[in-house]
Image (tube, rainbow, N blue to C red):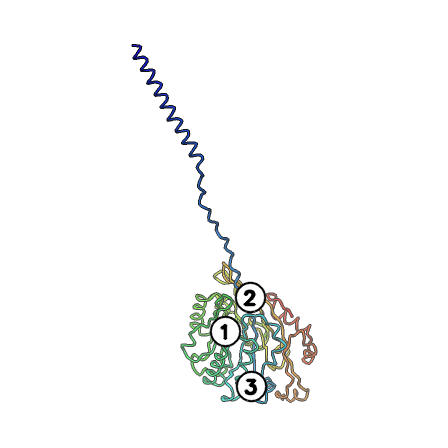
Amino acid sequence: MRRLTRMRGIWVIVGLVIVLGIGTGVVLALRQTQKQPVSSPEPVQRKEQVTPPAELSLQFAAMGDMLPHDSVVAQARTADGYDFSGYFTAIKPLYTGSDAVFCNAESPSAGAAFGISGYPAFNAPTEFARDLAGAGCNVINVANNHMADKGQAALSATVEEWQKLKPLAVAGANRSAEEQHQVRYFEKNGLKVAFVAFADFSNIALPQPYSVNLYHDRGLVERLVREARLQADVVLASMHWGTEDAHVVNADQRAAARLLADLGVDVIVGTGPHVLQPVEWLERPDGAKTLVWYSIGNLLSSQLQSNQLTGGVALFKATKKDTGVIISDVQFKPTFMSYQWSAADKAAQRLLARHDLKLQPLAQAGAETGMFGTTVAEQTARVREWLGPDVEVTN
């Protein structure tokens, strides 16, 4: 019995040893585990800060009717051709820095082969187009009432002359029906611009149905503008319209402007009345606004009245934002066109006797405005009145 009891004691002791050994092993194992270096977690991938793209913007300038009257052409005559560049020397600072410069070339520039002539049936030397381009004009309107003055051949030759000069866009007169249905596009500063151009009428019956874009062809207007709106960031429309020598916008202009705004045009540049007319904004169905310059007047001419000789440079900026394109920074810098004309020559209406033609900023035209019975201050005040409150008039 004692032997059995002793054996049980031994087995109890052995069991305790085994249990204690296992426990010690577990503890040591745990301690060993704790001593193992802990692997570093995967580094957190930081999202690189994406710098939002710089705003895409385009600075526009627009200049009105360029009329090669006989006296304008005569003063540009040189020993071996013509040079119109001098007319623009004084006003270039008004639009230097603009990316796109609109000009209304209100005459064929088909050259001597078609006969150089002024009012009423215009045709300028080819140098007229060359020197307008050299002065900075690179968005060219050729939809106007004089473009067909010398027929289709001269019109086509004019379009070809402009194409040779490689402007950003030329629109409004066409060499074929196919050409008439092509929207003109250009890209600048990351923005795609569509340029469309229309006139109210032609002084002579159009040689071909496609010769000049007329805005009374509503189907043509809708087709071109709808495509332009789908394809471009900015849609610019040139409209040669209005009542000549009237500072008041007529009902036809307002109806056409309303149609263009409804179709989504961003800016309408109006020419044709030969004088300044108001600027306004039209609400659009898409929630944006259309800027309308109803008439930016004459720029280069030798017309007779001070209001016909007062023009300028219209300025505005298009900026592409997430919400669409915004038109801003609407300004106008007035110019004045002058010439010398004796009382006797004026009384006899000897138009070719006009000489010393000069185009300059209105602010610099002190003595010259006096020859036309006005002053710089009076003309500046009139410019503000004619254009209205939606544009800033600056020097």
Drawn side of residue 370 relative to residue 389, left or right: right
Specify the amino acid type for callout 2: Lys
Specify the amino acid type for callout 1: Leu
Work out how far the residue at label 3 is from the one at label 2, CA to CA, in angstroms. 35 Å
Drawn side of residue 254 relative to residue 359, left or right: left
Q: Label 3: how many residues lie within 10 Å, few (<14), some (14-19) or many (20+)?
A: some
Specify the amino acid type for callout 3: Gly
Q: Which residue is mark 3?
A: 118
Instruction: Indicate the position of residue 176 as horizontal and vertical percent values.
Output: 41, 79
Quadrant in which the C terminus is drawn: bottom right
Q: Earlier in the sequence, mark 1 or mark 3?
A: 3
Work out how far the residue at label 1 is from the one at label 3, CA to CA, in angstroms. 27 Å
Image-quadrant location for residue 206: bottom left
Instruction: Indicate the position of residue 184 as horizontal and vertical percent values.
Output: 46, 73
Q: Which residue is mark 2?
A: 317
Image-quadrant location for residue 279: bottom right
Q: Which mark is residue 168?
A: 1
